[in-house]
Structure formats: C-alpha cells, structure tokens
Image (cartoon, rainbow, N blue to C red):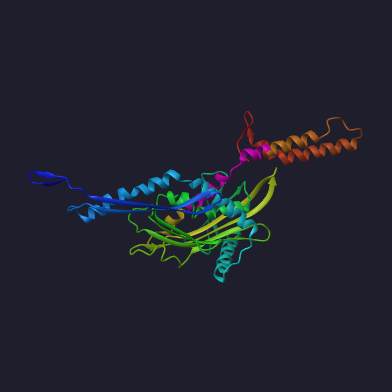
Amino acid sequence: MDYAGDIKWTTRGIQKAVVVATNLESFTGIPQTKLVLHQFFDTRAWISHKLLVKSNAPQCLNMVKDIKFHFEQNQAIDTAEHAVMTNLIRNVPQVYTPEEQISISDGKSFMCRTTSNEGTSISFVSSDPLVAMKGVFYGGEALGTGIATTIMDATAEEVISSVYCDLYSRKLEASPSSSYIIELKSKCLNDHSLLYLTERKLPIPGFSPREAPTKATWWRDQDGSAGMDVSITDEGEDLLPHKPGNVRMVVHTVWTCTPLPDIGGLPQTAVKLATKVDLAGVVPAFLMNKLGTGFLSMTSRLRQRFDRSHEVDVMKRTEIITRMTALRKSEPKNPNDSLQDKNSLRKVRKHFAPIWMQVEGRGKVVGR
C-alpha cells in the first residue's frame, strides 16, 4: 500500500520470472544441471532503487540457492573427484611445463633441506600423539620452517590426491576450513596444477588482511613416491584482484609421501609436510613461529581421515598368534633343536615386545 496523508490505496506491481534448466555432462554417474533464473520487477511506485536491489531482489533470487541446496551432493562429488584424481596420479603420465618443472625442483630442494642436520630444531607440542611437529631455523634465520611427520594408512597417491582435491572441493567452497578466510578462489589449470587464491584475516586484532595467491603442482616419481608443491605465484590476478590496503604474504609448502611395507594388506605411507609462512608487514617473527602449529595441524586432520588403527592392530595381533601357533609345542628330540626353538622364541618376543607394551588393562590398545 502507498500512503498519502489519510488516504491509502493499493498499487499493483509486476513481477515476471523465467527459469532455464540445462542438462550438462554427468560426473561419474551424478547428473549435473545448469540453472538460470531471470527475474523482472516493476513496483509501479516510487521506491528507492537501492532498497529494491539490496533487499527485495536478493530475497526473490534466493530460490536458486534453495533449489541447489535441495539437490546438493557435495560429499558424493568430492568422493568421486578424489577417486578420479587418485587414478590419474597413479596411472596417467604427466607432461610439465618448464615453469612447473622449476616449481617441482624447488619443492624437492626445499624438502631435502629439512632432512639435513643443518639448523636448530625446536619441538612443537602436537595435539595428535601420532604426528611429530617441530620448527627448524637455518643459518640464524629468525623465521623458522615448520615440519610435521606421520604415517598414514593409505597409498601415496591417495594422500596427495586428498590434499590436492581439498583445494577446490565443493565442501571447501561451501564452508572454508578456516574461519579466518574472507574470500577463496580456485581454478584448475590442468590435470596436475591449480591456482589457490585466498584473502584472510589474521587472528591478531589491528592487522590488515593477508592475500596468498598460490599455485599447487603435484608429481609422482618412478619409485612410487609422490609430492606436491604450493608456492606463491603472480597468476590469478583476474580471478582474485589485489585489494588496496591488503598485504601479500609469502607461502611455500611441500608435501612428500613415501610408500612403506604394507601391514596385512593395508597400505602404509610416510607423510612429511614442510611449510614456511611469512605474513609480511610488521608481524614479529616470534609470533609467526608461534602460529606454526596451526599450519601443521592439517597433517593431523588428514591422518585422522585415513585412520585405520583398529584394523592395523588386528592385523598385528593376528600375526602374533600365527607365529606363536607355528612354534612347536612338543619338546624337541635333540638339544640342538631345543636351542634353536629357544632362539626363535627370543626373536619373536624381541620383535613383538613393543606391541605388547602398548596393551594395558583388559586388552585395551593405547597405540600402534
């Protein structure tokens, strides 16, 4: 109703809407559809254009969001994407550009430096007892390199695929993993490289937002090991333009995965994460080092995703029972056989002593 003094009357507006749904190519059996809503408003009255655009129009257009939410299958899409990427890393040879080859070489050199005995190490307190964390300072540098190591119950391809797919997953776009992320954009360049651009606020009041335009590239070596390099890039300015007042941080993160012998058919992989983050600006180095455990905690989340500790423990206990059952119960006929049996028993006890030490109370397993 429009009001003019004590007189009031109704004014009929005009609203039209056209919804266009177009079928797209399905992804691993999951149908995909592009939905476009064209909306027309005519209030036939003197209403602020700003009020109409900022308030009324978004409410009417929200029907697209509601429809998308109703049919959403983010988890299924991410799972399928992870399976496709795992197969790609394992079976499809990649051709890298000269720039990508340089990034991979720099990533391997960065990781090799962390395996040397150079620098001064400081252990970090890890919330996950199965993930070791430390900071290393090289050549008197004030800014350290954070390192996290663990063993995961997955193949090297599965681990790298998970880390890589997480950078552009549906789940991440819908709900960023960090509450400090203001804006996030990602773009796949090819099968092995993508842009991952973020703008985030610091967990410290009074500091300007930080921008981190990075490029991620994965690789797989002939020996079955795999890795991924994430470093700063100048690409992606059109995707997430620089905002005045923001500070560009410097990030270099490298993942490496080395296959280990299976345990009862369950794959085992030694995973190592090395990262060096310079928040730039006037943030003190000691404060950045203190925040290092936050960047390394992603290793713990990833380990828990693949955790199959119960199955590993069952396999180990089954192996113990099998080996003990194989020992002859009867007394050997000659002293030499008796000595050999005793030596075999000592070897079994020595080999499995660490496992027995991890059992307490009524068979409760306290570790692997």
Range drawn in magenta: 292-314
Q: Nearer the viewer, residue 169 or 345?
A: 169
214 on left or right of 86: left
Question: Residue at position x 41%, y 66% from top?
Answer: 238
Residue 291 x, y percent position in the rendering: 45, 53
* Residue 134 in view of the camera: no
Q: Is residue 211 left or right of residue 83?
A: left
**In x, y percent, where is residue 148?**
55, 52
Residue 260: say if magenta.
Answer: no
The answer to whether residue 82 is above or below residue 281 is above
Q: Which residue is drawn at 32% across and 51% down?
A: 17
Residue at figure coordinates x 53%, y 54% from the top left: 165
Question: In the image, residue 55 lies at what x, y percent?
Answer: 26, 50
Asked if residue 306 is among those painted magenta in the image, a careful observer would answer yes
Q: In the picture provided, is 296 more to the left or to the right than 227?
A: left
Q: Toward the viewer: 140 or 38?
A: 38
Q: Is residue 189 above or below residue 149?
A: below
**Residue 347 placement (x, y as % from top left):** 77, 41
Q: Magenta segment, principal secondary structure?
A: helix
Left or right: 116, with 174 as reference point: right
